Image (tube, grey):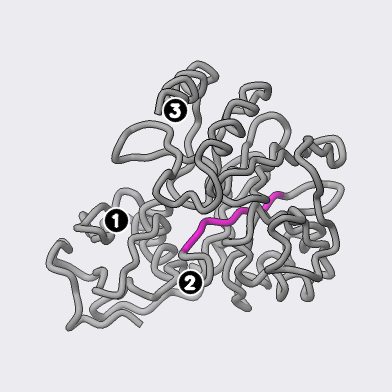
Amino acid sequence: MAELKRRLPCNTEGEFFVDESCIDCSVCREIAPGIFGDGEETACVVKQPESEEELRDAFLALVSCPVSAIGTVSLKVPENVYNQLPIHIEDGVYLCGMASRKSYGALSYFIEHPEGNWLVDSPRYHPRLVDRIRSLGGVRFIFLTHEDDVADADRFAEEFSAKRIIHLEDSGVLPSAEIKITGYDPVPFGEDFLIIPTPGHTRGHMVLLYRNRYLFTGDHLAWSRRRNGIVAFRDYCWHSWEELKRSMVRLLDYEFEWIMPGHGYRAKISKKEFERFVRDLLKE
């Protein structure tokens, strides 16, 4: 739980604050970007909520923080805040919230689909989130982009009798996974899903393309608000930077509108933006 005595000096005065336990993940800034911004290698409250919507988003960020670094001076979390999880983005695609410390606060997603719902990477297992996901029809598949962001996938799989999907090369962290992708060719999965192996960040990293609109990218690429552009994470590339670049080139063969990352921020991008990013990346 956040402690007022450890409140960071970069916070704007008022009810909400971030304390020294912050690990500078992107969760609060993704959920409530008008309230939370950048400190010095931390998040900070840059504006206190004024409207009901801003107050709701601030509380959603608070309950979703993986290390409980967000606190309030006197307010308690309203019960109805949990009913807003997962957070609907559009077209049956949701941001789970409830990030896990085990995945360093990686974002995870929920996809509503008539043939069975999906989790993309795992949020923190929390009874209130589990209840909300159950009310949306549960989970049939849990797609894991790579070994870093497995978090509580086992518990969600047990809860919903869901099948876990991970690449064989990263399956050492999840040896009991029901579906292990082998090789590096794209794997169609039903009418709307395409699994695309993208080795680089890890040997078995994969992305998921949904309806040729949403690219769930794990730690392969993201949007950076600081750089105002698409980024890949060279400093956090655990397997091969050169292989990551080759994997990025392969994505030029596909159409998508959204990048939905584990770390960093989601964004709508154009084909030209992505082509320019890849072209510049290959020069590095």
Segment tinted magenta in the rendering: 105-111
Image x and y of residue 91, in percent: 66, 39
Image x and y of residue 20, in percent: 24, 74
Residue pointed to by mark 1: 36
Depth-wise, is mark 1 or mark 2 nearer the camera?
2
Image x and y of residue 278, in percent: 49, 24
Name the residue located 41 percent from the left edge and 75 percent from the top edge. 77
Using the image as rendered, state which of residue 132 and residue 231 is in the foreground: 231
SS under mark 1: strand
Left of 216 or right of it: where is 222? left
* Residue 73 to residue 238: above or below: below
Q: CA distance from mark 1 to mark 2?
A: 19 Å
The quarter of the image holding the N terminus is bottom left
Q: Amino acid at mark 2?
A: Arg
Q: How busy is the neighbourhood of tag 3: few (under 14 within 10 Å), some, or many (20 plus)?
A: some
In which quadrant of the rendered view does residue 66 lie? bottom left
Q: Amino acid at mark 3?
A: Leu
Residue pointed to by mark 2: 101
Residue 281, label in figure: 3
SS under mark 3: helix
* Residue 132 to residue 221: above or below: below
In which quadrant of the rendered view does residue 120 lie? bottom right
